Amino acid sequence: MTKILVTYDMFREGFTELESKYDVTFPDGRDFTYEEVFEMIPEYDVLCSMFDFPVNKELIDHAPDLKMVANYAVGYNNIDVAYCLEKGITVANTPDPVTAPTANLALGLMIDTARRITECDRKLRTLGKDMKIGVLENLGVNITGQTLGIIGMGRIGKALAKRANACGMEVIYHNRRQLYVDEETKLNVTYASMEELLAKSDFVSLNAPYTPDTYHIIGEEELKQMKPSAILINTARGPLVDEQALVKALQDGTIHGAGLDVFEFGDYPLPELLEMDNVVLTPHIGTQTLDVRIVMARTVCNNVIGFLEGDRPVSRVMRP
């Protein structure tokens, strides 16, 4: 019987169908360590990996029967995709379930940062009746009528564009390839060069995958091209932004603010960002709702069954 190894012990209800058909191994109450998976993997045909579990050349070479890696995430920078494809191993991800919640969070961070919601909440809790409240206090920015620049017009970028349009924003975008004219018309978006987007946008949202080409796509020079009133939003991957350059840009007023769900150096931001009222921070919660997490698990399950049985679509990763 086909043997499937799952590195994480979460959302088991999403794996019911898979468990009914195949020999599936889960950790008990915790995630498997890399060392544990390395010892076990030679016996398995399929690996279901969490987004932070490294599927590297060393592990792949130690898995002679491995035919598929099904990642519990839309991103796959934890996997050596090029080497998997070279070895004939299929890689799959979970793009569809994460689209709406991640786009919703990006819009939420835009509104929160622009309207100073978190800042005002914090001040009211801390200062109480000593907080200044008046016509000219706590002024923010109305996103309606503002220009949103989206970098990366994939599923999430398109979903965010629809939400921004509903809020009365003008949407421009930059992408690896320009969309077809009919799709631009349908989405009510306009293509711009990177330079044009940075110069014109009141909000810049990063929605691109993390690749060698997108590493530090926003760095010191790009930040200098943005408006002093601009707000940067990142719900994609931390290393897309040079975080030290961002700290400096926020400190010296090169840009106005930032809403960040991901950070360059891991799970936590640089300490300077924690002290800034014009920065809203969330701990990588783009898909952090129970219903979405269960659907993601079912998508992993469907990817595996579709690969093994050919009876349903598989969200294949076709290139690194």
Image (spheres, rainbow, N blue to C red):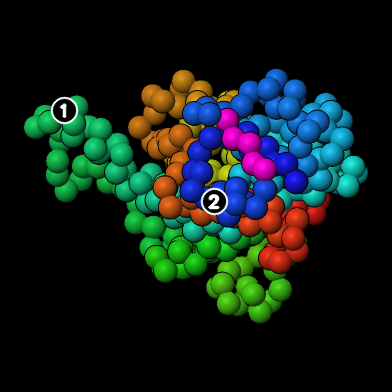
Mark 1: give few (<14), some (14-19) or many (20+) Cα within 10 Å. few
Say which residue appears at 75% left-offset and 56% top-offset: 307
Q: Report x, y in % for residue 194.
A: 68, 52
Q: Secondary structure at mark 2?
A: helix
> Residue type at mark 1?
Leu
What's the residue at 22%, 32% (across, down)? 123
Residue with the mark numbered 1? 127
Residue 7 versus residue 240: which sits nearer the camera?
Answer: 7
**Residue farthest to the front?**
1
User: Is 154 placed left or right of 109 in the picture?
Assistant: right
Judged left or right of residue 58, residue 132 is left
The three-letter code of the residue at mark 2 reads Thr
Q: Is residue 25 a member of the stretch shown in magenta?
A: yes
Q: Which residue in the protein does label 2 denote? A: 16
Relative height, residue 72 to residue 252 (above, below): below
Q: CA distance from mark 2 to mark 1?
A: 50 Å
**262 to 136, vertically: above or below:** above
Height in image: 301 above or below 24?
Answer: below
Horizontal relation, residue 19 to residue 319: left or right = left
Mark 2 closeness class: few <14, some 14–19, many ≥20 residues within 10 Å: few
Whether residue 152 is visible here, answered yes or no, is no
Which residue corresponds to the image point at 42% horizontal and 47% vertical from the top-left? 289
List x then y, in percent, for residue 140: 31, 48
Q: Which mark is residue 98?
A: none
Nearest the camera: 45 or 114? Answer: 45
What range of the chain is rendered magenta?
23-27
Q: Position of residue 21 (x, y in %)?
A: 65, 52
In which quadrant of the rendered view does residue 5 lie? top right
Mark nearer the N terminus (2 vs 1): 2
